[in-house]
DNA sequence: CCACGTCGCTAAAACGTTTTCGGAAAGTAG
DNA sequence: CTACTTTCCGAAAACGTTTTAGCGACGTGG
């Protein structure tokens, strides 16, 4: 009896369990159990099924599995900023934490457009994602998607404004503290802080951490105040020129972003200051292309975004299992030492 | 008769067509036809079904639809470099071209690891993606995935090494030509080309376009030869110092990447050259953070990666419909004018 | 020889849709 | 009143898998 009589090969389409079963001479049920390592299957039979599956290059239809299991093995990742630098590492960490075996990531880029976001949300829910990770483009709180989506949601990088939701974010306060701590350990005493847009909560958090640590060391911010403006190189340059007038004894600058730090470095070099011998500079973000290309390469605070993504994925996995959490969890930043800081001999 | 007797609400799970049908007092078949705009449904009935669906906030299960339609409405995007700058715009363009309604994007980051790539590939095929977009981290050809995957594949940015496959890439030769053309139009005559890693095909393509255009204008490369080394700011600085010795009359530099261009700008400024008055500089990539932060902001060649993603998606859609293409299609780059180039008054 | 387990396997239901086919009701023509 | 069309609707199959329930066969202890 030819196999084809029982389960003819459907040209162009992937093989089904039915064909595997036919080739092995068993029922579909037995084939399923054999391949999934269930018991109640003889070991000889299991072998035959396995061989048949290999021969046909069988791979189970995840859609069909999803139908019966009532879960798609899929999570949605809703981002507001796909080209941005921040969503990517998070995405990567998340993709990592779910092995590609059990979970796949369905990507949706909302582009900060609310109606586009609603469309994407509908599409993802229609695909019956088991959960959702929402990653913002800015570290500030964003509006909650609501509790009644039917699937668990974890917010990463940008927390939800609803404390009932679960959010994982970088600890900006601790990051600012870490930066200043490093500068103090390097023996610096006249430390300025040049940072970005004052409408960002993150600016203030980083500044708060920085000032706290300065105060503990009995120091004040050099220049008299934290300097806010924009996250740009140009501002880094401008602020530094001001600073050099106001504080001739300046020996360190904590920049609120790597872009600002680049500007600070440029202005210092232009003014004839040696970095790090005379003035140390530390940035924030660890944006590789900026930090490694500068003269000298930039010491900076790494917000550990991949880790954030990993944690978000773990929290989401827990929530899918039924153990939902809530509240905002802040994770520590990491100091990355390059050549723009060094001990004051 | 209560609706619940016919189709009780399953707590925690999304509503099904069965429940919608029950609420509207029709059969499942009729409900399906009504919602999908099929004929053979009375308009009053259609209304009732629609209302019921709205009331229940019904959204059809895409997995089930996929089962019967034999397509998942999903494409896989296999990238080698998720944090990299190049895959993202492509991804975005692709996401754009398929509306989120009909197609969703399943993301997989292979991280240049062959075995990881195989895993992801299996996972994607198991999810029965309707097609695959493969986007590389480098513009050079990459090994083909083969023809026997059962789904159409389009390679973007990095072409497949098998001409039987379909690839869409940026036209580096035309890009190099475009850069030099712009410099010549600005009245520059002594034009150097500092570029990156000589093992990249893209370096040579860009250089070829540049030299062709120079030759047409009766010019030779300033400094005597195209300068290859690495895609770094440091190399841009080093090369420029060399160049200033060899070619005192230098009035333009075409940098093979924006990173290199940043180095070139720094070195020129340090040497007291004014940009663009004395020396014009043009980069390649249009990497925003680098190009807009520099002093002065950088004129550069934009490889139009979003467009590449869009085209890749269109080609893939055609292939899914059965109209498969093959070969390498190169798409033009775009000149983005900022302040580092200007006519020689 | 009987009662009872255990083992290996299969038939069938279920998941949520779409589509095909047939049937009922109502209208129209003869 | 019959024959035929048209209009609207429902029953059932199909997609590919997992799981439940049940059925023989076989061994074992009495």
Image (cartoon, coloured by chain):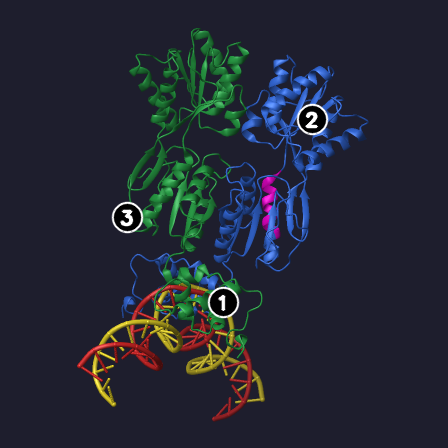
Chain colours: A blue, B green, C red, D yellow
Q: Chain of mark 1?
A: B
- In this view, the mark in front (2 or 1): 1
Judge whether residue A338 can be spotted in this image. Answer: no
* A309 is within the stretch colored magenta: yes
Instruction: Examine the structure image and report whether residue A79 is included in the region drawn in magenta.
Output: no
Residue at 48% x, 68% y is B20
According to the image, label 1 marks what residue? B52
* The residue positioned farthest toward the top in the image shown: B248
Front-lying residue, B317 or A177: B317
The C terminus of chain A - image quarter? top right
Main SS of residues in magenta: helix
Residue A216 seen anywhere in this rendered image of the structure: yes
Q: Which residue is mark 2?
A: A227
User: Do circles 1 and 3 both sit on a common chain?
Assistant: yes
Q: Are marks 2 and 1 in contact (CB under 8 Å)?
A: no
**Camera-nearest label, 1 or 3:** 1
Marked residue chain, label 2: A
Q: Which residues are magenta?
A: A304-315
Q: Element under label 3?
A: loop
């Amino acid at each position: 009896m030819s196999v084809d009589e029982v389960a003819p090969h459907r040209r162009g389409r992937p093989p089904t369990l039915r064909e595997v079963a036919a080739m092995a001479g068993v029922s579909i049920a037995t084939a399923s159990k054999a391949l999934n390592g269930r018991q109640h299957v003889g070991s000889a039979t299991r072998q035959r099924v396995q061989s048949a599956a290999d021969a046909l290059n069988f791979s189970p239809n995840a859609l069909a599995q999803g139908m019966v299991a009532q879960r798609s093995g899929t999570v949605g990742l809703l981002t507001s900023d796909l080209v941005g630098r921040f969503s990517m590492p998070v995405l990567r960490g998340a993709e990592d934490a779910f092995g590609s075996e059990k979970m796949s990531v369905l990507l949706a880029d909302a582009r900060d457009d609310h109606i586009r976001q609603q469309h994407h949300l509908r599409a993802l829910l229609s695909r019956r994602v088991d959960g959702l990770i929402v990653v913002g483009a800015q570290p500030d709180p964003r509006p909650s998607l609501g509790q009644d989506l039917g699937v668990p949601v974890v917010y990463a990088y940008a927390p939800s404004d609803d404390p009932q939701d679960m959010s994982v974010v970088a600890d900006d306060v601790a990051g600012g503290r870490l930066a200043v701590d490093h500068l103090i350990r390097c023996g610096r005493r006249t430390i300025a802080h040049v940072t970005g847009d004052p409408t960002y909560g993150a600016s203030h958090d980083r500044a708060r951490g920085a000032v706290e640590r300065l105060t503990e060391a009995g120091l004040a911010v050099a220049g008299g105040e934290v300097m806010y403006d924009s996250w740009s190189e140009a501002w880094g340059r401008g602020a530094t020129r001001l600073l050099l007038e106001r504080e001739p004894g300046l020996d360190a600058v904590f920049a609120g972003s790597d872009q600002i730090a680049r500007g600070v470095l440029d202005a210092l070099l232009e003014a004839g200051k040696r970095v790090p011998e005379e003035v140390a500079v530390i940035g924030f973000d660890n944006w590789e292309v900026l930090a490694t290309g500068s003269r000298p390469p930039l010491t900076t605070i790494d917000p550990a975004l991949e880790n954030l993504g990993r944690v978000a994925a773990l929290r989401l996995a827990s929530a899918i299992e039924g153990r939902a959490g809530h509240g905002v969890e802040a994770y520590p930043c990491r100091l990355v030492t390059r050549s723009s800081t060094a001990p004051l001999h």
